[in-house]
Amino acid sequence: MRINQLGVDTSTLPKAMKTGTTIVGIVIKDGIVLGADTRATGGSEVMDKNCEKIHYLAPNIWCCGAGTAADTEKTTELIASNLELLRLSTRSQSRVVTALTLLKRHLFKYQGHVSAALVLGGVDVNGPHLYSIFPHGSTQRLPYVTMGSGSLAAMAVFESRFVEDLDEEAGIALVRDAIRAGIFNDLGSGSNVDITVIRRGGDVSRFRTYENAAGSAADLRKTYPRPTKLTPPPGTTFVIEESFRPHKSVVQPTPIIQSSLETNRDMEVVS
C-alpha cells in the first residue's frame, strides 16, 4: 500500500531469487554434529559443486549457512572477528550464547535483508548447544534442527530416527542420511556431504566431502554397457564428395621471384 501511494510501479520491482541448501545439526552425547550439502545455485543453474557451507566462528563454535552465499560468508566472518577480539580481551573461551546474541542482533538490525539462515552449534563450559537462526533475527534452541530448501526431507529423517544421547558414530550416520535426503529430494541441494563434529573439550573434526552422495560419474558410466548399434564401425557412412577451401587468413601470398635477365636490365637502367 505504501509503495502504491508513492507512485512506484510495482510490476518492475526485483523478485527474490530462490536459494537451495540443506543444512542440519544434532546434539549427541558428548558434542554437536553439523552437516551440509555443497551445491551453490544461481537461479536454476549450478554455480559451484563444492561450496563450503560450514563456517568457522570460534575454535569451539561452528555455523552452517543457508541463503545468499555472500551474506552467510561475510556475516560469519564478521562475528568470528568479534569473537576473536572478545577472547583476546577476556582471555577465556567463547560462549555459544555470545555468538548467538551477536548473530541475532546483526540480522535483526537489517530486518531480513541480509539473507542468512544459520544453524549454530558449539560446546562450551555449559555443555553442547544447538540453535537455528532465521534471517530476521528470531532463534530457537532444539536438540536437532534443519534449514534450507531441503530441510523438510532432512527433518523427516530426524523425526523418524533421532534419539537422545547418540554416540558419535551413530550421530554422523544420522546427519549423513539427513543431508542425503535433502540432496535426493531437493533440486537446490546436491553434490557432496560435509560434516563437522564438535566434541566436549574443544576437539573438532572436519570431514570435507565426507561422502559423494550421487557417486562418481565415471563409475556409473562403467556400469552401463554401450549398445553396439550406437558404435558404428569406420566406413559405415558412404562419403560422396570431399572438398576443402582454406580461409583467406590461412592462405599465404606467393612471393614474386624476378628472373636474372630482368634483374640485369634493371641494373643497366640505374647505371
Image: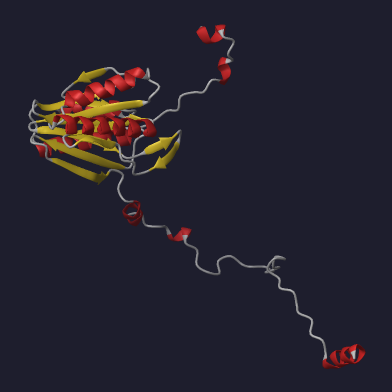
> Could you tell me residue 205's position as x and y percent?
16, 42
Residue 201, quarter of the rendered image? top left
Task: Locate residue 247 relative to residue 99 in the image: left or right.
Answer: right
> Could you tell me residue 198's position as x and y percent?
14, 36
Q: Residue furthest right?
A: 269
Residue 66, quarter of the rendered image? top left
Q: Which residue corresponds to the image point at 82% horizontal and 86% vertical from the top-left? A: 258
Task: Locate residue 38 relative to residue 97 in the image: left or right.
Answer: right
Q: Is residue 187 visible?
A: no
> Could you tell me residue 164's position as x and y percent?
9, 26
Assign the C terminus to one quadrant of the image: bottom right
In the picture shown, does residue 251 fall above or below 59? below
> Could you tell me residue 206's position as x and y percent?
20, 43
Q: Which residue corresponds to the image point at 27% horizontal and 33% vertical from the top-left? A: 81
Q: Is residue 269 visible?
A: yes
Q: Which residue corresponds to the image point at 25% horizontal and 19% vertical from the top-left? A: 139
Q: Considering depth in this image, is 73 or 119 the residue closer to the camera?
A: 73
Please state the total of marks drawn on the protein image: 0
Q: Which residue corresponds to the image point at 59% horizontal and 15% vertical from the top-left? A: 9
Task: Locate residue 243 relative to residue 21 in the image: left or right.
Answer: right
Q: Considering depth in this image, is 262 or 82 the residue closer to the camera?
A: 82
Q: Considering depth in this image, is 262 or 154 the residue closer to the camera?
A: 262
Q: Residue furthest front?
A: 89
In the picture shown, does residue 108 fall above or below 201? above
Q: Considering depth in this image, is 226 or 7 the residue closer to the camera?
A: 7
Q: How is the image coloured?
A: secondary structure
